[in-house]
Image (cartoon, grey):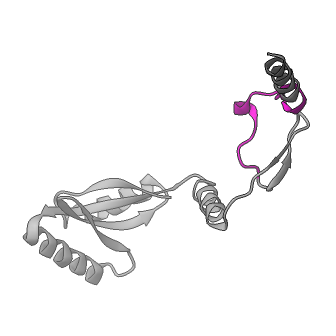
């Protein structure tokens, strides 16, 4: 019985001596500061030891979401499905490139449609001008927003 009391007292004192208190909730602390060794406001020291692969993933994540995505406006001049849709998309893109070599064009596949989009403008107004120019040649055209991250 004496041993149980002594062991209990030892464990209790041990937990008091080696426990630490956090004065700020964890959700207020910053997650992964830019430096590896980081001294927090409340006097603690956080050291993150990570594999270089993890650091590279975190760096790429920060780089990818660092700025707002770029928004471009394009004019879609064709969409179709199936094997004939693919062939028609290539034919229409080639014809467009021959008539307007200065305007960029691309074929986009969003299942099940093949789409031909032309132009790459920062403002919708510029895309509207291209649409008005192409309206006589292509019947079902409209302006689309293209977001590049």
Quarter holding residue 15 = top right
Front residue of this view, candidates 109 and 57: 57
Q: Which residue corresponds to the image point at 86% horizontal and 29% vertical from the top-left?
A: 14
Locate residue 124, reporting x and y percent: 43, 53
**Among the 4 quarters of the image, the one containing residue 99:** bottom left
Name the foreground residue: 58 vs 142: 58
Q: Quadrant of the N terminus?
A: top right
For the stretch drawn in magenta, the main secondary structure is: loop
Q: Is residue 129 left or right of residue 51?
A: left
Above or below: residue 84 compared with residue 149? below
Taking depth in this image into account, of 15 and 66 the one nearest to the observer is: 15
Residue 68 point in image, percent of width and height:
57, 52
Magenta span includes 64: no
Residue toward you, 57 or 137: 57
Q: Using the rendered view, name the quadrant where residue 72 is placed.
A: bottom left
The range drawn in magenta is 15-33
């Amino acid at each position: 019985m004496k041993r149980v009391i002594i062991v209990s007292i030892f464990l209790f004192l041990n937990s008091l001596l080696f426990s630490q208190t956090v004065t700020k909730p964890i959700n207020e602390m910053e997650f992964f500061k830019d430096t590896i060794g980081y001294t927090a406001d409340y006097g603690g020291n956080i050291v993150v030891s990570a594999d270089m692969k993890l650091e590279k993933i975190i760096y790429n994540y920060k780089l990818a979401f660092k700025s707002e995505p770029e928004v471009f406006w394009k004019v879609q001049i064709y969409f179709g499905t199936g094997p004939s849709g693919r062939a028609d998309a290539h034919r229409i893109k080639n014809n467009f490139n021959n008539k307007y070599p200065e305007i960029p064009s691309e074929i986009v596949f969003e299942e099940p449609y093949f789409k031909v989009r032309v132009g790459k403008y920062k403002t919708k107004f510029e895309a509207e001008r291209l649409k008005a120019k192409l309206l006589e040649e292509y019947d079902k055209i409209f302006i689309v927003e293209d977001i590049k991250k």
